[in-house]
Amino acid sequence: MIPNHPLRYFLPILAFLIMASCKVEKKTDAAPAAGGPKKDMPVQVNGFVAVAKNMKENIEVPGSLMPLEETEIRPEISGRLVSLYIQEGTAVQKGALLAKLFDQDLQAQLKKLQVQLEIAQKTLERQRELLKIQGISQQEVDLSELQVNNIKADMELVRVSISKTEIRAPYAGRLGLRNVSLGAYVTPTLVMTTIRQLNQLKLDFTVPEKYGNLFPKGKKVEFTVDGARRNFTATVIATEAAVAAETRSLKVRASVLGSDGALLPGAFAKVVLNTGGKDQSLVVPTQAVIPQARGKKVIVYRGGTPEFVDVETGVRDETFVQIIDGLSAGDTVVTTGLLSIRPNSKLVLKKME
């Protein structure tokens, strides 16, 4: 060995690098051995046996009380008010006169036509007598008769115009506030007052789309209003023909049973809806259902192995969810450790809920 050879400085460094490399390889080889058994370790889970029970779900939705009928009173034609019989807040009968517009010009036209009709009728009578002795042609008689009929038609048109100057109540109800005064010039765009039929109220509310088929005609619903400490009942009379695309909800209309002084049109109501049925339904805990991009799944315990099953769910409450399809009574579903379970996992039931 040459004492001053250049390699004598690099040999210790090379030996050190070889030893370090061997240690890293041993650690790398040992790592799978340490982690290997963990792959085969079973997952401890809790289970629940699917059972049948009565499912009920009560949801609360906002609603509005409305009068059975509500109409804005407007004149059919323009004109000046010469009489006004609207007494605010009073009850009126159907056909009651509420206001009268100026109609003297129409009355004058009607009188003029009445005079013309009398003359035309006398002329027609004379011509019919002349026709009997062949003193006039049938054509002239027909023309006179046509004139009489035209005058009668004109008189009927004037009478219709006169009737439009009278504003009457369309049905029995209670009047609202008056928006006009005597002598004002009114047009068909002006709301003079409103009339409401208050002896019967209706309740309008909306329900989520998935519950739309649970409210057929005749179903009873309960509701409350502020200031009243009791529940009221209404009967569904109709539902909207389509679901609102903006809210994905369905509008329902119900008729309020009976009349009560605590119920006022336009009042806010809280409608309590029982969306559950009376039949026995297969249920599982809500945490056992795994949402998917398309549908829902549950994990069924099958002799120590998991089985991912597609299910169709129904109504739910605070604890359980209804299973419509996918499970049978007696199936054990996994309720814990769902995120760590894979199709080839081994399961150990730690506890039955």
Image: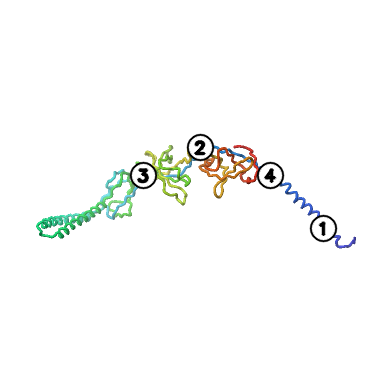
Residue at which label 4 appears: 40
Label 2: element kind? strand
Q: Earlier in the sequence, mark 1 or mark 4?
A: 1
* Residue 319 makes an appearance in the image: no
Where is mark 1, residue-wise?
Answer: 14
Q: Position of residue 241 (x, y in %)?
A: 41, 48
Labels 3, 2: front one:
2
Q: CA distance from mark 3 to mark 4?
A: 70 Å
In this orientation, which residue lies closer to the viewer: 169 or 89? Answer: 169
**Residue at the disc numbered 3:** 68
Quadrant of residue 319 within the rendered picture: top right
Label 3 vs 1, first from the N-terminus? 1
Which residue was labeled with disc 2?
Answer: 280
- Are the residues flagged by discs 3 and 4 in contact, CB closer than 8 Å? no
Q: Along the horizontal axis of the image, is 258 left or right of 185? A: right
x, y percent for residue 206: 44, 46
Q: Is residue 306 left or right of residue 1?
A: left
Mark 2 in CB contact with mark 1 (< 8 angstroms): no
Say which amino acid is labelled 3. Answer: Leu
Q: Nearer the viewer, residue 183 or 78?
A: 78
Distance from Cα at disc 2 to Cα at disc 1: 80 Å
Residue 296 in picture, x, y percent from top left = 55, 46
> Closer to the camera: disc 3 or disc 4?
4
Q: Are marks 3 and 1 in contact (CB under 8 Å)?
A: no
Mark 1 and mark 4: span between their CA atoms? 42 Å
Circle 4: element type: loop
Q: Amino acid at mark 4?
A: Asp
Local secondary structure at mark 1:
helix
Alpha carbons under labels 3 and 1: distance apart: 100 Å
Q: Earlier in the sequence, mark 3 or mark 2?
A: 3
Which percent across, then down, holds residue 308?
Answer: 59, 45
